[in-house]
Image (tube, helix red, strand yellow):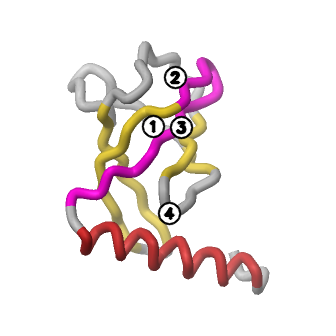
């Protein structure tokens, strides 16, 4: 969700890392680099929400975001989850 109430969009998260992610979407959003957004996602049955900055806009393809963590606890939760996913992928369980 972009921090403009008229700019909500949904997409599929790809290329998630400890620092950010790319959200694939066909929505054509008039987004500017460094605009603030709120990312909400669910991974391994856990829900996460964090602020992010728009870093890369590819019209008709998606948007790249850099995470901006509100506190250390959320940052550690997301980083731990990414580590779990990395291990699971290496073992072929994802």
Residue 10 image label: 1
Q: Nearer the viewer, mark 2 or mark 4?
A: 4
Rendering coords of residue 6 (x, y %): 26, 20
User: Are the residues at dot 2 and dot 1 in contact (C-beta closer than 8 Å)?
Assistant: yes
Q: Nearer the viewer, mark 3 or mark 2?
A: 3
Q: Earlier in the sequence, mark 1 or mark 3?
A: 1
Q: Earlier in the sequence, mark 2 or mark 1?
A: 1
Rendering coords of residue 67 (x, y %): 39, 51
Crowd class of label 2 (few under 14; some 14 to 19; many from 20; radius 10 Å): some
Tag 2 residue = 27
**What residue span does the magenta drawing correspond to?**
56-70
Q: CA distance from mark 3 to mark 2?
A: 14 Å
Q: CA distance from mark 1 to mark 4?
A: 21 Å
Q: CA distance from mark 1 to mark 3?
A: 13 Å
Q: Earlier in the sequence, mark 3 or mark 2?
A: 2
40 or 69: which is nearer to us? 69
Residue 64 image label: 3
Crowd class of label 1 (few under 14; some 14 to 19; many from 20; radius 10 Å): few
Tag 4 residue = 18
- At 61% from the left and 23% from the top, the residue drawn is 58
Could you say whether the residue bearing mark 3 is in a helix, strand or loop? strand
Query: Residue 9 lies in what quarter of the image?
Result: top left
- At 45% from the left and 18% from the top, the residue drawn is 29
User: Are the residues at dot 3 and dot 2 in contact (C-beta closer than 8 Å)?
Assistant: no
Asked if 27 appears above or below 55 in the picture, the reply is: above
- At 41% from the left and 69% from the top, the residue drawn is 78
């Amino acid at each position: 969700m972009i921090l403009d109430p008229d700019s909500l969009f949904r997409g599929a998260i790809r290329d998630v890392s400890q620092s950010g992610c790319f959200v694939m979407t066909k929505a054509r959003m008039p987004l500017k680099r460094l605009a603030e957004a709120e990312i909400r996602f669910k991974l391994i049955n856990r829900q996460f929400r964090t602020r992010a900055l728009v870093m890369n806009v590819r019209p008709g393809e998606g948007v790249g975001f850099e995470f901006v963590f509100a506190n250390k606890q959320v940052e550690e939760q997301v980083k731990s989850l990414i580590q779990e996913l990395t291990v699971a992928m290496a073992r072929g369980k994802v």
